[in-house]
Image (spheres, rainbow, N blue to C red):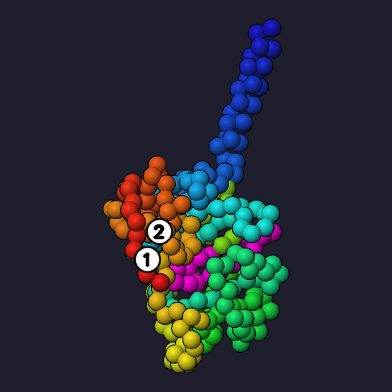
Amino acid sequence: MTIFLLITVTTFLAIGVLWAVGLRFRSDPIRAMRAIAQMYDGKFTQTKNPDQTAVSFDLHGQPAMLRIKPPVGYAGRYLTEFRTTWPEPRLRLQIQPRKTLRPDFFYDESPTIESGDADFDAKYRLYAEQPETARRLIAAGLFSALDELNQMTRPGAAYVEIHDGFLFVTLEKTFGYADQLEVLVAYCCEIRIPSTTITPNDEQLQSDATPASVPNTMRTICNACGDVVKEDGVACNDCGAIYHRRCWDPKVGCVLYSCEGTTATEASLTH
């Protein structure tokens, strides 16, 4: 009887340990985001409007953000977005895999162009306001990490948009482990470069175009949702970061990793 009881207790203990281990190591996107916040000494936030889980952190001296956000424009899976600053505010382009075109992912849609790289053009569709600059970046292999990002995102895909001084990489997938997010950030860092200039040919094209077609001034980006703030914006009283009024949550405060601000006032916007 004693042996039977011992075996029973041992069995239940083993099952309990295995269950606890499985619970500890199962895929959990929210736990992964908390872990990546600790890894990068970043700031973890969750908000309802916009509905997102985000981690903001320092990336080689520039602000960056990872966030999980709801499907955009269609019934689908939750998305992971990487965002950081881009050195040339006038550059506007989008890159989509040809197998899964999602124009509703992008704030702006630029004219479609060919890059001149046969392999790239076979896999991706390129939209750019400054075609010569875009072709030069592609010829330099700047977006080669897109192949790896699309492998990571299967069965979804990865998309790139650059506008108003920001780089956005959107992936049709969430990641349940911190090491996956670490790899994701590393690939996105390969796209982020220290300096980009508009080529002389594109400068001439812009000067000949109407001001409304390619604005030369950087528009204000909401630090929560990442969209352009056209009106009804507020600014964090501590750091001046701009938000849509609807995106500012006083319970959460400023989402930037370097700021603990909890109050905001009406912002003066420049377009």
Q: Looking at numbered disc 2 in the image, what kind of residue is underneath it?
A: Gly
Q: Give the number of the disc on residue 46.
A: none
Q: Which residue is mark 2?
A: 233
Q: Is residue 214 left or right of residue 17?
A: left
> Can you give x and y, in whole percent of width and height, for residue 1 in the image?
69, 7
Mark 1 Cα within 10 Å, few/some/many (few <14, many 20+)?
A: some
The residues colored magenta run: 149-169
Residue occupying the point 65% across, 66% down: 102
Quarter that holds the C terminus: bottom left
State yes or no: residue 168 in magenta: yes
Locate residue 167, reporting x and y percent. 48, 68
Vertical arrangement, residue 23 with respect to residue 141, above or below: above
The quadrant where residue 18 appears: top right
* Sequence-earlier tag: 2 or 1: 2
Residue placed under numbered mark 1 in the picture: 269
Q: State whether residue 154 is above or below residue 177.
A: below
In the image, 262: left or right of 169?
A: left
Q: Does 19 appear in magenta?
A: no
Residue at (53% x, 48% y) in the render: 51
Can you give x and y, in whole percent of width and height, for residue 245 in the image?
A: 42, 54
| Residue furthest top as drawn | 1
What's the CA distance linking mark 2 and mark 1?
7 Å
Q: Residue at x 64, y 59 (%)?
A: 73
- Quick one: label 2, few (<14), some, or many (20+) residues within 10 Å? many
Q: Residue type at mark 1: give it.
A: Leu
Q: Looking at the image, can residue 42 be seen?
A: no
Farthest residue, direction right: 99
- Pointers 2 and 1 in contact (C-beta within 8 Å): yes
